[in-house]
Amino acid sequence: MIREKTLELKKDFIHIKRYIKFWVFILLIAGTLVAYNQYYFKVSKDIIEFNQIKSKLMTQNAMLKKEISRLSSPERISKMAVKKLKMKPVNYSKVHFIEIK
C-alpha cells in the first residue's frame, strides 16, 4: 500500500516536474505584464498632471502678456512721466535741432 502510494507520488512528481518550466514561464509573463501595467498607469497619470500644469502656465503666461501690454502702453508711460517725474510734453516750436556733418 505504501509502495503504491510512493509510486503514485513519483509519477505525479514527474508530471509536475515536466510542466514546472511552463508554469514558471507563465508566472513570469504575468508578473511582467502586471508591472508594465502599473508603470503605464503611472506614466498616464503623470502625463495628465503635466498637461494640467501646462494649461495653468499657458493661462498665467497670457495674463502676464496682457499685463505687460498694459504697463508698456504709451499713455501710461506719459502719465507716469508727467506725474512722478514732473516732465512736460515737448513743445517742438521751442526745440532747436542741430545738424551734424
Image (spheres, grey):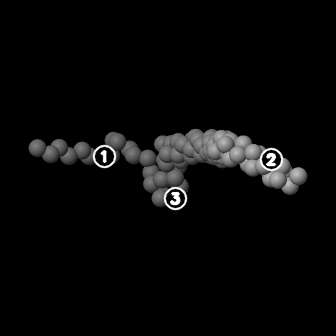
Work out whether residue 74 or residue 40 is closer to the camera in this orientation and state it.
Answer: 40
Mark closest to the chain's N terminus, 1 or 3: 3
Query: Residue placed farthest to the right in the image?
Result: 1
Whole-angstrom CA distance, mark 1 to mark 2, is 118 Å
Amino acid type, label 1: Val
Q: Which residue is mark 2?
A: 8
Nearest to the eye among marks 3 and 2: give it.
Answer: 2
Nearest to the eye among marks 1 and 3: give it.
Answer: 3
Work out whether residue 98 or residue 68 is closer to the camera in this orientation and state it.
Answer: 68
Specify the quadrant of the image occupied by residue 56.
top right
Mark closest to the chain's N terminus, 1 or 2: 2
Q: Which residue is mark 1?
A: 95
Query: Is label 3 in a helix, a strand or a loop?
Result: helix
Whole-angstrom CA distance, mark 3 to mark 2, is 104 Å
Q: Which residue is mark 3?
A: 84
Amino acid type, label 2: Glu
Q: Residues within 10 Å of mark 2 (few under 14, many from 20)?
A: few
Q: Residues within 10 Å of mark 1 (few under 14, many from 20)?
A: few
Work out whether residue 48 or residue 18 is closer to the camera in this orientation and state it.
Answer: 18
Left or right for 71, reference 50? left
Query: Residue placed farthest to the bottom in the image?
Result: 85
Left or right for 34, reference 60? right
x, y (%) of residue 13? 74, 48
x, y (%) of residue 2? 86, 55
